[in-house]
Amino acid sequence: MREIRNIVILTGAGISAESGVATFRGPDGLWEGHRVEDVATPEAFTRDPGLVQAFYDARRAKLKGVEPNAAHRALARLDAEWPGDLLIVTQNVDDLHERAGAERVLHMHGELRSAWCLACDGRSRWEAPLGDGPACPACGAQGRMRPDIVWFGEMPYEMDRIEAALVEADLFVSIGTSGAVYPAAGYVQTARYRGAQTLEMNLEPSQGSYFFHESRIGRAGDLVPAWVEEMLG
Ligand code: BJW
């Protein structure tokens, strides 16, 4: 096995579940009660912007009441203390990695606390509702702000940077993601093909579980701190 210096960590909704943020799939998932096509596609936004804005306004408001958990804090510690390259690629649109103190974080599916102005193409930090059609702080256009979220059929952010990190990775770790959504679901294969060791930590085997060298099954809040201790110990 080659020495581990460069680490890429992919996180999904499962890492925030113990903080009280809903996951997507499964019995209590966010998609329960919503059809994906009704809220998470650009077509849905064109058809019914009020419904889509309300869905994201409610989730943005809920963020104020949640805190990072032991898994976020452990990754922040690894980020601070790991001497090699490290990149946390999160599919999550919450800001719990940052609030735990992690710095090397990339949000491939966008962020709830960011708004995208369709008039000037600018992004602004955003805490308030978007449903009432606020003006863009950059260009002043009224009612042209949408959630800065990557919907189905849209290109995830920073694909080149992610690809470059995967190619250089000695270790790829996936935490709390079902492996149902591409391109993130394919990252284990990219990293493994380039010689990385691969590890997943999830409540249950993910859809791509057989691509990983090792699967640890359990809660992120238990598994991730123990793994970080192994890495730094
Ligand atoms: C715990 C736990 C605990 C619970 N501890 N674990 C056919 C084949 C292949 C691809 C496609 C296809 N048809 C269409 C596509 C492309 C499409 C896609 O993948 N569709 C699939 C449905 C098949 N992808 C796209 O459109 C993407 N864009 C794209 O591909 O552009 C073109 C392109 C091509 C090639 C290269 C590059 C680009 C865009 C995808 C955008 C995804 N957006 C969403 C919603 C918006 C954000 C939001 O509203 O918040 O992002 S979908 C939703 O799923 C969200 C998530 O980030 C994403 C992944 O979900 P995640 O995180 O895995 O959550 P869950 O709920 O699925 O799983 C949670 C897991 O945690 C479970 O396993 C639990 O067991 C576990 N867990 N508690 C540990 N305590």
Image (cartoon, helix red, strand yellow):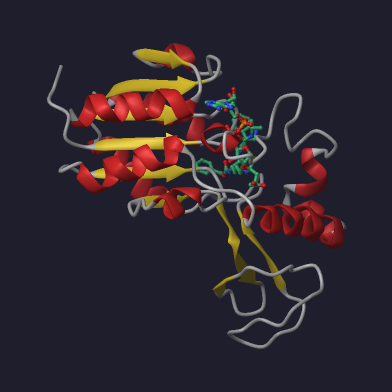
In the rendering, at what x and y percent does residue 103 appear? 34, 54
Q: Is residue 29 left or right of residue 5?
A: right
The residue that appears at 60% across and 27% down in the rendered structure is: 180
Going 16% across and 35% down the picture, which residue do you hit? 5
- The outermost residue toward the left is 3
Whole-percent x and y of residue 146?
A: 70, 66
The quarter of the displayed image where residue 225 is located: top left
Q: Closest to the observer: 71 or 24?
A: 71
Does 105 sit left or right of 47 as displayed? Answer: left
Name above or below for residue 132 compared with residue 210.
below
Q: Residue at x 42, y 22 (%)?
A: 200
Q: Quadrant of the C terminus?
A: top left
Location of residue 21 with respect to 210 vertically, above or below: below
In the image shown, does 102 or 11 lie closer to the viewer?
102
- In this rendering, does residue 158 appear at all? no
Is any part of residue 6 visible from this angle? yes
Instruction: Report x, y in % for residue 163.
Output: 35, 42
In which quarter of the view is residue 147 placed?
A: bottom right
Q: How many marks?
A: 0
Q: Quadrant of ligand 1?
A: top right
Q: Horizontally, is 112 left or right of 87 in the view?
A: right
Q: Is 155 displayed left or right of 146 in the figure?
A: left
Residue 2 position in % (x across, y down): 13, 22
Quarter holding the N terminus is top left
6 or 70, which lies in front? 70
Asked if residue 118 is positioned above or below residue 183 in the image, the reply reads below
